[in-house]
Amino acid sequence: MRVGLFVTCLVDLMRPSIGFAAIKLLEAAGCEVHVPATQTCCGQPGYNAGDRAAARALAAKVLDEFDGCDYVVAPSGSCAGMIRTHYPGLFRDEAHLAVRVERLCARTYELTDFLASVAGLEAVPGTYTGTVTYHDSCSGLRELGVKRQPRALLARMSGVELREMPDCEQCCGFGGTFAVKFGAVSAAIADRKCEAIEASGARAVVLGDLGCMLNIEGRLRRRGNEAIAVLHVAEVLAGSVRS
Amino acid sequence: MHFKASAGGALGDAVLQANLARFGASGFALARARAVEAYGAAEFERLRTAGAEIRDRALATLDAYIERFEREAAARGATVLFAETGAEACELVLEVCRRHGLKKAIKSKSMLSEEAGLNEALAAAGVEPVETDLGEYIIQLAGEPPSHIIAPAVHKSKDAVADLFAAHHRSPRKTDIGEMTREARAVLRGHFVSADLGISGGNFLIAETGSGVIVTNEGNGRMVTTLPRVHVCITGIEKVIPTLEDFATLLRLLPRSATGQAISNYVSLFTGPRRAGDRDGPEHMYFILVDAGRTNLVGGDMQAMLRCIRCGACMNHCPVYRTVGGHAYGWVYPGPMGAILTPSYVGLENALELPQAATLCNQCGVVCPVRIPLPDLLRQLREQEVERRLRPRGEMLALRAWSWVAQRPRLYALATRWVARVLRVVGGGSGRIRRLPGASGWTRERDLPAPRGATFRDLYRRTGARPAPNAQPGASAPR
């Protein structure tokens, strides 16, 4: 099973360890991992900002780069959701590409969704000991139905104790450029998320999208919370973070 | 309209924030979730699909259904009038007032009346408008616009209402909600019996019977539509649906989506004025169907918005609405539906910030009873802003530069390598950035967890799939 890893631009720049954790997990699931060297961005920033042409150009690039893969997997519900849910619309006037776009969409997965639903990863390679709470990122949850998959994988780790927070499906206030354009509103929304995380009593919040991670971690620290770790689910599952 | 400035004010308003917190914690969203669970989640999804289909079917040949409605309503003795603008609608109501010599209007809730500025027009013409929905009554006393389409006074605290009532009712200040409600009820009774005009909105107009429908909880709507000599129902042209059967389906959706009720306390259908032998009902009945920008949406990108049945679920579930309240949206309609309707009706150039003021989390889209793809519509409005060059130059340049570089992998690799290095240096030993010139929109409110310095692509090229030793723990794992 040849799996193309879509690293995502944020992981590439901000937290490469997530990319390596994803590789470790995919290999543990028996996949041959292919990382196209020319990949950059799925086009979502332009797409959500209203620059459709830019989004389409980057989507065409992704289409080419992952042509030879059986599956495309991203450690991000947001980027995988962009491909699966929104690429067809970007190419709706280009009938000659329709089959390729459809094929790409059908084999693109968010990482935990792929590991749990497609690859059937049984033995999670990492170890982690501690209490965690899980934040459901918007795109993964509402575009791809990622909800039970990360929890099912975490449940296979004997040291992990999941303590659900209230309103775990509520948006953290990131929203891409929204977080910068309306920083104060975004931070106020993030405050409620921080309070929910703190109310769970968990030592770490685990999630599957780097955008939300940067927002939640950034706000937690600014609020003076130095105690709660903000971890990508891939890092926990791969054992690449200290307990 | 300046969303950002108004939102800033809303964030700093402690009373509003307390009210919004209460609304979020115990409000309509929770009630809806329970109602959907009781109904059966899968069955409710089918109901949403059916609701969307009914609305689409009605809108596809709306002109024919409007004509049918007009014929059927006229056959039952009602008069159907059409207004192209809100101002025309006001003029039509004033004409009715002049024709019948009307001096005092009791009103049940109508968002179209807010769109048209009907209360101001009535008052200016010497007709006293009295809002009788409790929330509308409160904000009329306060001289404020509604902040929610079904809970117009949700921004007000009990204390603020107590002050208002004490001042306007000239009675001792009460703080028990039951007592306050009874006092308002007693005051409103006098208005109900002394008014000669009743003005209602219309949740739906039913083409096959020429009926109007209002869905309410307080009973005031029923008095407004039956007690005064004349009843005027004023609503948007898009509210016409084909049949009573369609109405039955939509009625299963509306209260559950709005307040979590299986059915509202009152569902009033009104079909023509009082007939010979009827014990009550108005002598004259008018329907005023208002366009006010709706026709412009037909056949365009925003057509799906015309499905809206005004339940408020989108705002009840919106993280932005729940944080800043309704007034920040600047016009009649707040929340996600407002962020689409306001630019559609008052012009995109007059509401540039609204389509941007959303995280696109899609909490609105998944609860909309008629499956309006609200985030997609917001995104399309953003596209229109770009196409019409309505975005700031700096923003456009930054976006263009980003996508230009992202399409050139070697340049991109070089650029990100440098950005990562710079961020690492700025982050210093703490691994986090508290101030970053050019990114103050982020760092004013949040730290930026800094990268360790090398990009994934550089590490991967150097080491293959093995993670580099220093790439391991999270960039700013707690110490």
Image (cartoon, rainbow, N blue to C red):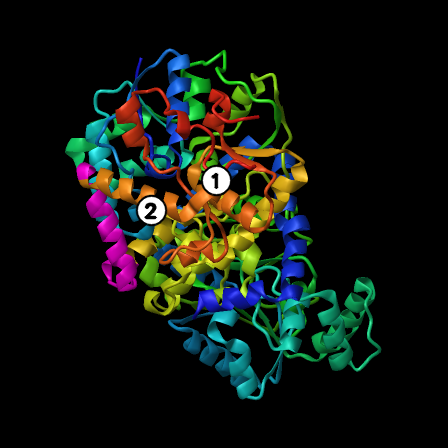
**Looking at the picture, how far across and down is residue B196, in whole percent?**
64, 79
Q: Which residue is mark 1?
A: A213
- Residue at left 51%, top 33%? A231
Pick out the residue farthest to the front: B429
Is residue A223 something one can see in this rendering?
A: yes
Label 1 chain ID: A
- Residue at left 21%, top 28%? A65
**Looking at the picture, how far across and down is residue B153, in whole percent?**
64, 65
Q: What's under tag 1, amino acid-wise?
A: Met
Residue B296 lies in quadrant = bottom left
Q: Main secondary structure of the magenta part?
A: helix
Neighbours of disc 1 within 10 Å: few (<14), some (14-19), many (20+) = many
- Residue at left 45%, top 81%? B91
Kindly report which numbered mark, 1 or 2, lies closer to the viewer in this rendering: 2
The answer to whether marks 1 and 2 sit on the same chain is: no
Q: What's under tag 2, amino acid-wise?
A: Val
**Looking at the picture, how far across and down is residue A242, in whole percent?**
54, 26
- Residue at left 26%, top 20%? A69
Q: Which mark is residue B422?
A: 2
Label 2 chain ID: B
Q: How many marks?
A: 2
Q: Which residues are magenta?
A: B385-410
**Looking at the picture, how far across and down is residue B172, in whole percent?**
84, 77
- Is B409 left or right of B328, judged from the image as shown? left
Residue A6 lies in quadrant = top left
